[in-house]
Amino acid sequence: MDGEKAILILNISNYKTAVIERGTYYFSLSNYPHITELELSKIVAFIKYEKSHGRQTEIVCEDESILSIINHALAHLGTTKAALPFAENNFVYHATDTEATREILSNGKLLSAAKVYGKTGKELAFEKRDSPWNDPADYFEYIMFGWGDSLIGDYVVLSENFPSDDDLAKGNFNPGVRFYFFYKDIIQHPGHTFDGNHPVKIKDEIILTDYLYACIVPEQYKINLENFILQSIRPKVFFLSQEGIGLDEWNKKVYDYVRKL
């Protein structure tokens, strides 16, 4: 999103998945045109987060009853609950590429993009203005998470050069390294916040020895990474074979492995 743009569009419908792209949050309702309390809570959290960062939210929805429910909640924004999101599972994870992983494993910290590059969120937002996500400046000041069994982390890692559907199915792609955290633990981090989109995100940095549950590394990266792992976190780093495994199967394999640890 353009760093000068002060409006983000919330477009509510029955989309296959929820995603923010180029200044629009495509918000998917599970049973459109009905809205659950959880979904309303996420919308309230999103609008509160946007307001806290100086942005207005324009709401787009074809169903008048949904708009009425949301507008009522917004009229009571100070009292409408924007509570802790319901945990879809016990874990969240952050994914990244091998170059970033080398720094993370050797320094023992997960850092926001702003901290990694020593630049402001506005500078990074301008540099990334042509990316598919086109995130606002403040997003670069946070470490963002997806639910433990979601594909979003790999989608982000692969987005710079996204493979074909055939390559994804045959395993001809380079998945991200995943850093898994217990949801109940990471939401105790003093820098946590809820933005109505991610399960949680953390400002600036995370010390891995304080919160990391497991780091899952595709085995093909082992030779390039194993010598960079700090002894203090080595017991929590695991290498799994991804050879010939498609993205959906890989996602399931990783999540099943983490749950059994």
Image (cartoon, helix red, strand yellow):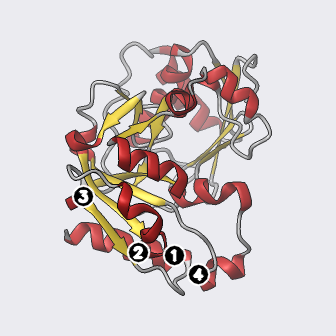
Pick whichever of labels 2 and 3 is earlier in the sequence. 3
Which circle, 2 or 3, is nearer the viewer?
3
Q: Which mark is residue 252?
A: 2
Q: Earlier in the sequence, mark 1 or mark 4?
A: 4
Marker count (numbered): 4
The picture places residue 33, in percent across and down from the top left corner, at 58, 49
Between the residue at mark 1 and the residue at mark 4, the CA separation in whole angstroms equals 10 Å
Q: Mark 3, mark 1: which one is toward the viewer?
A: 3
| Whether residue 31 can be seen here | no
Q: Residues within 10 Å of mark 4 (few under 14, many from 20)?
A: some
Cβ atoms under marks 2 and 1 closer than 8 Å: yes
Q: Nearer the viewer, residue 19 or 155?
A: 155
User: Label 2 vs label 3: CA separation?
Assistant: 23 Å
Q: Nearer the viewer, mark 1 or mark 4?
A: 4
Q: Secondary structure at mark 1?
A: helix
Question: Which residue is disc 1 drawn over?
Answer: 248
Q: Position of residue 153 (x, y in %)?
A: 51, 55
Marks 4 and 2 close (CB-CB < 8 Å): no
Q: Amino acid at mark 2?
A: Lys
Amino acid type at circle 1 is Asp
